[in-house]
Image (tube, rainbow, N blue to C red):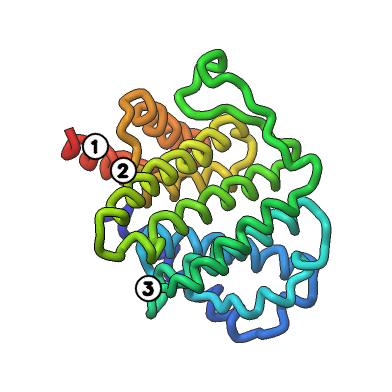
Amino acid sequence: MKSSQAGLGAWTHLSGVTLLLNSVSNFMGKGGLGEAASWIVLRQDMFFSMTKSHPLRIHLESYTMSSAFTDNSAESFANRIVFLCARIQAHVFGPDSRATAHQWTELKTDVDNWFQAKPWNFRPMWMDKAEAGHAFPCAWMHHPAYVVAYQNYCLARMLLAIFDPWLWEPGFDSFHKRRYANDFVLENLRLIVGLSISNPSVVPGRFLASHTLQACGTYLTDFDEQQAALAFLQDLETQCGWRSRPVIDKLIASWSMDK
């Protein structure tokens, strides 16, 4: 009961904030703390949207005036892929949830172009996961914002693969494409969780990994990865106070059904 009340309270708070931001059309062009806070609200709205399969409440049009699209800072670079990921979610969970193949191709091209324009120091420092004692890929990033950026890049690719309109056309070719898409989703899910475990001081990245596991953790079938994911969620609750038990219980139940 407490968990549901806490979730309702957080949802009500987010709804109020998004209504406030939506009522002020020029807040993104002002810069400063207001603009920075608006990006935090967008990420929170995205988390709720993804885990509840609910449409985004915030108006994305206002964000096009943000300095993130003209500034070269690490934070702005990260915010640009956050915005792209939000656009994908708007198609996936919006009133018209079936995007056209043309729209999907445009979104994929935008995500690819973002990655091609990455700064020279946007480069994960990979380490052998076995040597590091990790079940997931192990990599450190040069800047905390780059951790969140890379995670959102992976999440955008996951959503593009899961909801690709080409996969739902009848025929055996679509069946083979869906198998490839599942492997692709799993690869990017591993990266999201691995980046969070490798960079534990980046708290937004830990939350993003938690919400991604809540939405897509059922893709994990390897026992060691499942146990590492559960340990990660438990650590998040212990260290950050974020209630992970409902997600843990959901994943355990889902994985048990697949055995």
Q: Residues within 10 Å of mark 1 (few under 14, many from 20)?
A: some
Residue 212 at x, y percent in the picture: 44, 48
Residue 97 at x, y percent in the picture: 38, 73
Contact flag, marks 2 and 3 (Cβ < 8 Å): no
Please name the residue shown 62% across and 80% down the image.
Answer: 61
Please name the residue shown 31% across and 43% down the image.
Answer: 218
Tell me the CA gap for discs 3 and 1: 28 Å
The tag earlier along the polypeptide, 3 or 1, is 3
Q: Is residue 144 visible?
A: yes
Helix, strand or loop at mark 3: loop
The image shows residue 105, relative to residue 118, as above or below, that is below
Query: Which residue is label 3 attached to?
Result: 98
Query: Which residue is label 1 attached to?
Result: 255
Helix, strand or loop at mark 2: helix
Amino acid under label 3?
A: Arg
Which marked residue is nearer to the observer: mark 2 or mark 3? 3
Which marked residue is nearer to the observer: mark 3 or mark 1? 3
Q: How crowded is mark 3: few (under 14 residues within 10 Å), some or many (20 or more)?
A: some
Amino acid under label 2?
A: Thr
Left or right: 153 in relation to 67: left
Residue 138 at x, y percent in the picture: 57, 27
Left or right: 49 in relation to 127: left
Q: Can residue 8 be seen in this view?
A: no
In the picture, the quarter occupied by the C terminus is top left
Contact flag, marks 1 and 2 (Cβ < 8 Å): yes
The tag earlier along the polypeptide, 1 or 2, is 2
Amino acid under label 1?
A: Trp
Query: Which residue is label 2 attached to?
Result: 218
Tell me the CA gap for discs 2 and 3: 23 Å
- Residue 22 or 171: which is nearer the viewer? 171
